[in-house]
Image: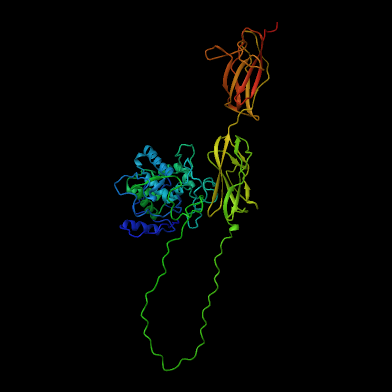
Amino acid sequence: MAAQFGRRLRRGATTTAVAAAAVAALSASQAPAAPHPDSASDDRTAAGATEPGDSAATGNSPYYTDLPPLDTPNKPGTSVNLPVTGSAEAGIPASVLAAYKKAEQGLASTDAACRLPWQLLAAIGKVESGQARGGKVDANGTTLSPILGPALNGQGFALIKDTDGGAYDGDATHDRAVGPMQFIPSTWATWGTDGNGDGRKDPNNIYDAALSAGRYLCAGTRDLSLATDLDKAVLSYNHSTEYLRTVRSWFEYYKRGTHEVPDGTGVLPATDTGSGTSSSPSPSPSATTPPATTSPSTPPATTPPPATTPPPTEPTKPPTTPPTTPPATPDPAETFGSLENAGTGTLTATAGEAFTERVKVRAKNELGAPLGKTSVTFAVVGSTDTRFAGGKSTVTLTTGADGTVTAPVLTAGEKTGAFKVTAVAGTTEPRALSFAASVTARVADTVARTDDKALTAAPGTEFADRLGIRTTYKGTGVADTAVTATMITDAETPAENDKGPYFKDEDGKPVRTLDLTTGADGLLELPKIYADDTAGTYTLRITTASGATLTVELKVEAPAA
């Protein structure tokens, strides 16, 4: 696990506890630390919640090691609701703070024995993403751009091969930590929860992520009011003693006081490069140790030269230093810089049909010019059965010379509703775009009879044959289509007839208008039709809400002699 080094130690530390926490943060190592001394080996939690290594919630991804300021936001024992004039570090963006408190309330009703404090979520959110990068979220709590950790490819980090087809992290080779609480996709698949009631589980949404983190921390029989259980929970999130100490320091800081600040104005970690909104916390240089210096030593005692003169020696040539080659710097014209929409239209389709629009993006280099040969991963994200050509939900393509690349054709499945299509490019600092898409239900464009039998009856009797109809959309039956059947006076100026054929209601009384619904494959057999004593030719009209219309002729005549 790669730690990152941020805030410098301030002078004037008055307690050994603060100094110890600071030193611990500056000594974070590149490998998972040993378990905390207080952790118990028989901690009972849900599967995968506490095991060290790759099974941690974040996959032991990097985190910010900034420590709280030495001047606390408020004195112990006083109100935790500070005015906005308090310490800047104590300010938490409004939506982020609301998400933490909402998660605490939710867990209090579903798992009261856990006693989750929202300040613990705030502490973890601080070290994982700097409170969603200072609260850069929209009105629904979703980050304005994805927050992605580095590829967990075993090179300085854990090795976790792709588990989601790149659906969440845009990486179809290795997993990455995702969102403000930095869940790896495999953990999110188990613990992901809808925290804002929009029907989706999105790791990039602070409400969803905060509630999911709370559930993860409360796994098993933990009581977070107990120090040992709290430590186990934090270590299950990222198995490092240094991580635990850093989270603990922010937890105590927030318990002493905090206040709300507007979204987007939160204090960013000192290690934040500010280079983009779609990358993870970027590691800053490690703390360095000055070169060791040696104390001057007493010169050795000298011995007078011998009486004899030594033979002359060849003069010693000064050592030559090979010329150094300056490190090569990447060519900005060949370095990926940004990803933009290249003219994608509205993505909507009817169930079972292909989308007429396709996602098109353009990659640019660091100079803002089109960049070819750039890999872009497109993914269908959300609860939908829409797929790219060939039934794939994720596909990786390469940009052309003009920097553009177009995703394959999307084909809608039978499930209707909204979803997203993402495009992700770049490895060091990935850039992502998200496109809203939707699938609408089929709407019947035709209503027709299932046979062509003549419908006749003698006065005062019932029609021997039942009328069968079918509603379709482009030839495919549409179930659950609302239809209205009405006995009308005239097809040109239709009005309900007050004589002639009729239906019967539940009480057996004559009615000449019925509202019905088609069944499977759009099929419907109408109720029996009865004739009164008036002979003649009558018209039955059947209509759908979409405007499809069918007229049927009904004859009432005495049987031939």
- In percent of width and height, residue 436 lies at 56, 40
Please name the residue shown 46% across and 60% down the image: 285
Task: Classify the position of the N terminus by image quarter.
Answer: bottom left
Scheme of colours in the image: rainbow
Q: Is residue 226 visible?
A: yes
User: Between 442 and 362, which is closer to the camera in this rendering?
Assistant: 362
Where residue 4 sits, quadrant-wise, is bottom left
User: Between 25 and 134, which is closer to the camera in this rendering?
Assistant: 134
Task: Classify the position of the C terminus by image quarter.
Answer: top right
Please indicate whether residue 296 sits to the left or right of residue 508 in the image.
left
- In percent of width and height, residue 182 lies at 46, 48
Q: Is residue 46 visible?
A: no
5 shown above or below 424: below
199 shown above or below 39: above
- In percent of width and height, residue 429 lies at 53, 53
Q: Given the current orientation, which residue lies at the most extreme top position?
A: 561
- In percent of width and height, residue 5 lies at 43, 58
161 shown above or below 454: below
Please indicate whether residue 260 sits to the left or right of residue 489 in the image.
left
Where residue 497 sits, quadrant-wise, is top right
Q: How many numbered badges does the structure rendering display?
A: 0
